[in-house]
Image (cartoon, helix red, strand yellow):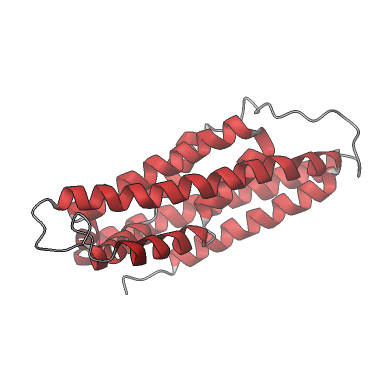
Amino acid sequence: MFFGITDFWAYAIGAFLIILLPGPNSLFVLTHAAAHGVRQGYRAACGVFVGDTVLMFLSAAGAASLLRSNPVLFTIVKYAGALYLAWIGLQMIRGAWKSWRAAPEVSEEPVTAAPSRSEPRPFRKALTISLLNPKAILFFVSFFVQFVDPGYPNPALTFVILGAVIQLFSFLYLTALIFGGTFLATQFRRRRRLGAGLTSGVGVVFLGFGAKLATASLG
């Protein structure tokens, strides 16, 4: 046993595989880095880190049990998150459509990564995406509890270690997405219509995330 963790390596492997699963957080970081560069990508990633940390703290504090015992509260949070994800998807599709109509097929303009002044702050947007997901709270507590020894005298330390492991994997994964996204963005900016088409596809995926969350249950 390692500081109250019943099977550290099983948890580490499981956390690594979970981080690799696609979701709205990682997709937002990828697309934002591709559109605005590495620095803005890390600002979005910081929003994800803070949001996940808050969710882990709420899980340890019993927020998941509160959602399970209060279906009305769960429904409110669920639909708020679904509407927000759908709104992001529609904004992406709208922006891609404007880019498709205004841009030539291939552009020789120099590539820039400066964010638009009208673009919402990535940290706040990523943080909101993370927090408006009650399924994430339920997932964190159902996953963590399998590896916590209830007899360990300092459970807070156990949760800190578990959280640090999953945040480390998240940092490495999002870093790969940020640099991979900015590399691919060079080609997308030179081929504006291709970039607009892919952005539309991402917007549709966000609409799918919203629909999936709207139909989520406590089971």
The answer to which of 8 and 129 lies nearer the viewer is 8
Residue 73 pos. (x, y %): 26, 58
Please state, as top left, top right, bottom left or bottom right, where the N terminus lies in the image. Answer: bottom left
**Figure quadrant of residue 127:** top left
Q: Residue at x 43, y 53 (%)?
A: 81
Residue 213 pos. (x, y %): 45, 63
The outermost residue toward the front is 1
**Figure quadrant of residue 215:** bottom left
The outermost residue toward the bottom is 219
Image side of residue 164 versus residue 158, left or right? right
Residue 62 pos. (x, y %): 18, 56
Q: Is residue 28 above or below residue 21?
A: above
Q: Residue at x 58, y 32 (%)?
A: 40
Please state, as top left, top right, bottom left or bottom right, where the C terminus lies in the image. Answer: bottom left
Q: Residue at x 51, y 46 (%)?
A: 172
Image side of residue 27 versus residue 104, left or right? left
Q: Residue at x 48, y 50 (%)?
A: 84
Number of numbered markers: 0
Residue 105 pos. (x, y %): 91, 45
Q: Is residue 216 visible?
A: yes
The answer to which of 135 and 154 lies nearer the viewer is 154
